[in-house]
Image (cartoon, rainbow, N blue to C red):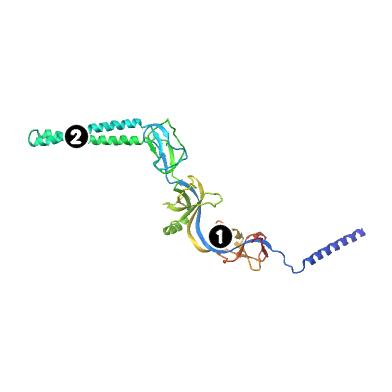
Amino acid sequence: MKPIFFKLVAVTAIAGTVACSSQGAKGPGRALPGSPVDVAEVVTKDMPLDINAVGRVEAISTVAVKAQVTGEVLAVHFKEGQAVRKGDLLFSIDPRPFDIALRQAESLLEKDRALLRNALADVARYAELVQKDYVTKQQYDTAVANRDVLAAGVKADEAAVANARLQLDYTAVRSPIDGRTGSLLIDPGNIIKANDTSPAVVIEQIAPIYVTFSVPEQNLPRIKEFMAKAPLATEAIPGENGHSSVSGVLTFVDNAIDQTTGMITLKATFDNRDAALWPGQFLNVRLTLTTEKGAIVVPTPAVQTGQSGQYVFVVKDDMTAEMRPVQVGRTRGEESVVASGLKPGERVVTDGQLRLAPGARVELKPGR
C-alpha cells in the first residue's frame, strides 16, 4: 500500500503545480471580461396619449332590397359581392302588366279632359244666357256643378296616371345606396312579391364605415375634454402584426354608460376607400387623446420588474451597470414613457439583463 500512497501524492503535487502555473499565466490584476449586452439611448420625443380597445367594424347603412311591385323577375344586373353605386339597376321585373295599366289610366284621363272641356263651354254659354233670362239660374248652377265634378274627375285621373307610371318605374329595382351586394336570394324566372318578408339582396355601405368599440367609463371625462378641442384621431389595426393601420376620426359617443359593464360605447368613422375594413371584422383600436411633448422614452424591453418595482440597468461611463428604479407612465408598442428615474442621453440595457448585477462590468455586443 505504501508505493500507491506516494504515487497519489505525486499526482496531487503535479496538479497543484499546473494550477499555479495557469494562474500565473493569467497574471495578477488582469480584468475579467464583461457581460455582453445590447443598449439603447434614452431620448426625448413627442408621444401620443392613447386609449386601446378591441373594436368591431359596422356598416354605416344596411339596406334589405325588396320589390315594391309583384311580378316575374326578368333579369338580374349584378353579381354577388359586387360593388354598386346609388341608382344602379339591380333587377328587372316584367313591365307589361304595368304598362297596360298606365295606358288605361291615360285613356281615362283623356276622356274626362274632353268632357271637362265641353262642360267649360256649357258654363260659358249659360253665363251669357242667364243674364238675358233665356235660361233659369238653376240651369246655370247645374252646368257649373257638372263642370266642377268633371274637373275633380280629371284630377283623380291625373293621380291615377301618376300612380300607374310609378308602378311601372318600380319594375326597375335600383340600388338606394353606394355599397356592396351580398348573396343573391332570387333568380330570374321567379315571381317576386311586393314587400316580401325576405329581401332579394342586402347591400351594405362600406365606404365610409364605422368601427364601434367600448372603453371604461373612467376615460369619459378625458375623452370629452380633448374632443371639445379637436377631432380625436383613431387608428384601426386589422393586421395581427399591428403594423398596418387605418386612420379615422372619433365621431360618436353614446349618450349612456352601460351599467352592467361600466363601459361607454364609441364609434369612429373611416373613409375605407381601399376596403381594408370589412363589416363584422374584429380588430384593435387606438384612440389618441393628445400628444405629450418632450417625453422621456426608452425601449420597452429595457424596463424590468423586480420585488421593489420597475427598474432599468444604466450603463455608466466606466462600462459598469447601475441598477436604477424608474416609474413608467405608459407603454405604447415597443416604447415606454418614463416619468422619473432617467435623463436623456443615458444608455440603458435592452438585452442581457439576466446576467447583470449592480456594479457588474458590461461589454457591448458587436455592432452596438
Closest to the observer, 117 or 2: 117
Residue with the mark numbered 1: 336
Residue with the mark numbered 2: 117
Q: What secondary structure is found at the residue carrying circle 1?
A: strand
- Image quarter in which the C terminus is found: bottom right
For the residues marked 1 and 2, what is the alpha-carbon distance in whole angstroms? 89 Å
Which tag, 1 or 2, sits closer to the chain's start?
Answer: 2
Q: What secondary structure is found at the residue carrying circle 2?
A: helix
Residue 297 lies, in percent from the top left, at 55, 62
Residue 104 lies, in percent from the top left, at 29, 30
Instruction: Give the total of numbered labels.
Output: 2
Toward which corner of the image does residue 6 lie, by quadrant?
bottom right
- Amino acid on which disc 1 is placed: Ser
- Amino acid on which disc 2 is placed: Arg
Residue 236 lies, in percent from the top left, at 50, 51
Toward which corner of the image does residue 34 lie, by quadrant?
bottom right
Closest to the observer, 308 or 125: 125
Closest to the observer, 227 or 329: 227
Closest to the observer, 176 or 60: 176
Is residue 153 left or right of 257 when viewed as pictured? left
Is residue 31 left or right of 61 when viewed as pictured? right
